[in-house]
Image: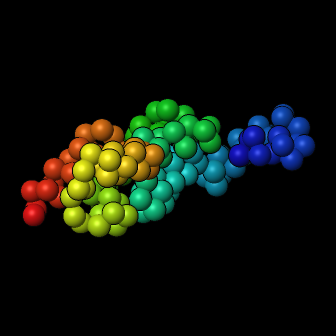
């Protein structure tokens, strides 16, 4: 919020005072923002790595990011499977090129290597 207000031309001292007043009144909370952001982005099919990076870009404290990701009631492995199947279908990749393409997609979406690997293993075992 501070960066946006600075770009709009507001004085830094006024910005800090206003944000402090909003926080004291309970109207601004980085914790609530992070929780909402994690939920929103996960619902759109993004993984924890990307969500964490986006929160950091928005100036959220690393401790808040870690806590929000840990407290989120999200099965990241199941989400990786869901995202992969939605994009590429439930069939296993036919060759190395298709598998690499799907892995790059999931990596771009912010899933860990373990989650990506497991998404292929679980869908292969279900067949």
Residue 50 screen position, x and y as percent = 47, 44
Residue 97 screen position, x and y as percent = 32, 47
| Location of residue 42 with respect to 20 vertically, above or below | below
Camera-nearest residue between 121 and 98: 98
| Location of residue 102 with respect to 56 vertically, above or below | below
Residue 75 in view, yes or no: no
Quadrant housing residue 91: bottom left
Residue 123 screen position, x and y as percent = 17, 58
Quadrant housing residue 59: top right
Residue 83 in view, yes or no: yes
| Location of residue 113 with respect to 84 vertically, above or below | above
Which residue shows up at 45% across the image and 62% down it? 44
| Position of residue 5 in the picture relative to residue 121 (left or right) | right
User: Could you tell me how many numbered marks the image carries?
Assistant: 0
| Position of residue 67 in the picture relative to residue 90 (left or right) | right
Residue 88 screen position, x and y as percent = 33, 63
Which residue shows up at 83% across the image and 40% down it? 6
How are the colours assigned in the image? rainbow
Which residue shows up at 10% across the image and 62% down it? 126
| Position of residue 21 in the picture relative to residue 55 (left or right) | right
The quadrant of the picture occupied by the C terminus is: bottom left
Which residue shows up at 23% across the image and 56% down it? 94
| Position of residue 4 in the picture relative to residue 103 (left or right) | right
């Amino acid at each position: 919020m501070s960066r946006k207000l600075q770009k709009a031309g507001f004085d830094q001292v006024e910005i800090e005072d206003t944000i402090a007043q909003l926080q004291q009144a309970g109207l601004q909370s980085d914790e609530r923002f992070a929780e909402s952001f994690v939920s929103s982005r996960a619902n759109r099919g993004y993984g924890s790595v990307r969500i964490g990076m986006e929160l950091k870009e928005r100036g959220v404290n690393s401790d808040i990011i870690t806590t929000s990701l840990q407290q989120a009631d999200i099965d990241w492995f199941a989400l990786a499977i869901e995202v992969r199947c939605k994009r590429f279908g439930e069939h296993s990749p036919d060759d190395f090129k298709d598998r690499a393409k799907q892995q790059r997609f999931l990596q771009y979406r912010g899933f860990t290597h373990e989650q990506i690997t497991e998404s292929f293993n679980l869908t292969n075992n279900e067949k």
